[in-house]
């Protein structure tokens, strides 16, 4: 283990069966962000550039869990023990990035979460003969927002959006895609 590289305390999180965040404790990590002169434009909540994380060995760090350090949230996609001595782990993660927002679910307290918004996205209704309609597409992290459903409200800045319906085939257990309509 290289001294000084693993110097941050991060929360180790998991998503339980009810889509609620559960903290498993704190772990020591070092976050290595790949610098890129021209990163691709974001197309969703996931940053398109993977992040390398070094961590002190902890058997609780497994694929599918999350690490949160300050305001950064990472979804663990790969874990390996490169030395085999159980001294440290090399972790690859997707960073979930978006605008700060809130989800207001029916009869529940608002939940703070990060939100990705894309405006004027073509949507083709499977029940209609019409051509594509331009809609607002959004994504939220399930670990922060929980089970967002139709008629819930997503707030970003001063703007409020009503969830029209869930985007088909967009819920992968980490991120949920939503079709939204701005509420005046």
Image (cartoon, grey):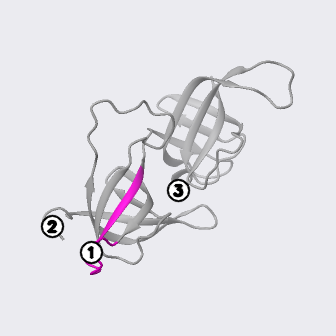
Q: Which mark is residue 83?
A: 1
Residue with the mark numbered 2: 2
Question: What's the CA distance linking mark 2 and mark 1?
Answer: 12 Å
Compare marks 2 and 3 and give the one earlier in the sequence: 2
Cα separation, mark 1 vs mark 3, equals: 31 Å
Comparing 71 with 124, the one in front is 124
Residue drawn at (30%, 78%) of the image = 84
**Are the two marked residues, 2 and 1, in contact with CB atoms closer than 8 angstroms?**
no
Q: Residue at x 43, y 30 (%)?
A: 41
User: Which corner quadrant holds the N terminus?
Assistant: bottom left
Q: How many marks?
A: 3
Residue 105 part of the magenta segment: no
Q: Mark 3: which secondary structure?
A: helix
Percent across and percent down for residue 111 are: 53, 50
Tell me which segment is drawn in magenta: 81-94
**Residue for point 51% across, 53% down:** 144
Q: Secondary structure at mark 1?
A: loop
N-terminal-most mark, 2 or 1:
2
């Amino acid at each position: 283990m290289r001294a000084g590289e693993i110097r941050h305390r991060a929360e180790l999180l998991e998503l339980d069966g009810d889509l609620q965040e559960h903290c498993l404790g704190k772990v020591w990590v070092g976050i290595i962000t790949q610098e890129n002169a021209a990163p691709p434009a974001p197309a969703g909540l996931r940053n398109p550039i993977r992040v390398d994380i070094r961590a002190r060995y902890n058997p609780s760090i497994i694929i599918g869990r999350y690490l949160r350090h300050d305001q950064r949230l990472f979804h663990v996609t790969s874990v390996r023990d490169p030395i085999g001595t159980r001294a440290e782990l090399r972790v690859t993660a997707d960073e979930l990035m978006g605008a700060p927002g809130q989800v207001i679910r029916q009869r529940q307290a608002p939940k703070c979460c990060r939100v990705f918004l894309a405006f004027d996205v073509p949507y083709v209704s499977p029940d209609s003969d019409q051509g594509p309609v331009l809609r607002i597409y959004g994504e939220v992290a399930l670990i922060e927002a929980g089970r967002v459903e139709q008629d819930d409200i997503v707030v970003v800045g001063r703007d409020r959006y009503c969830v029209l319906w869930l985007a088909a085939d967009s819920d992968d257990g980490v991120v949920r895609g939503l079709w939204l309509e701005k509420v005046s």
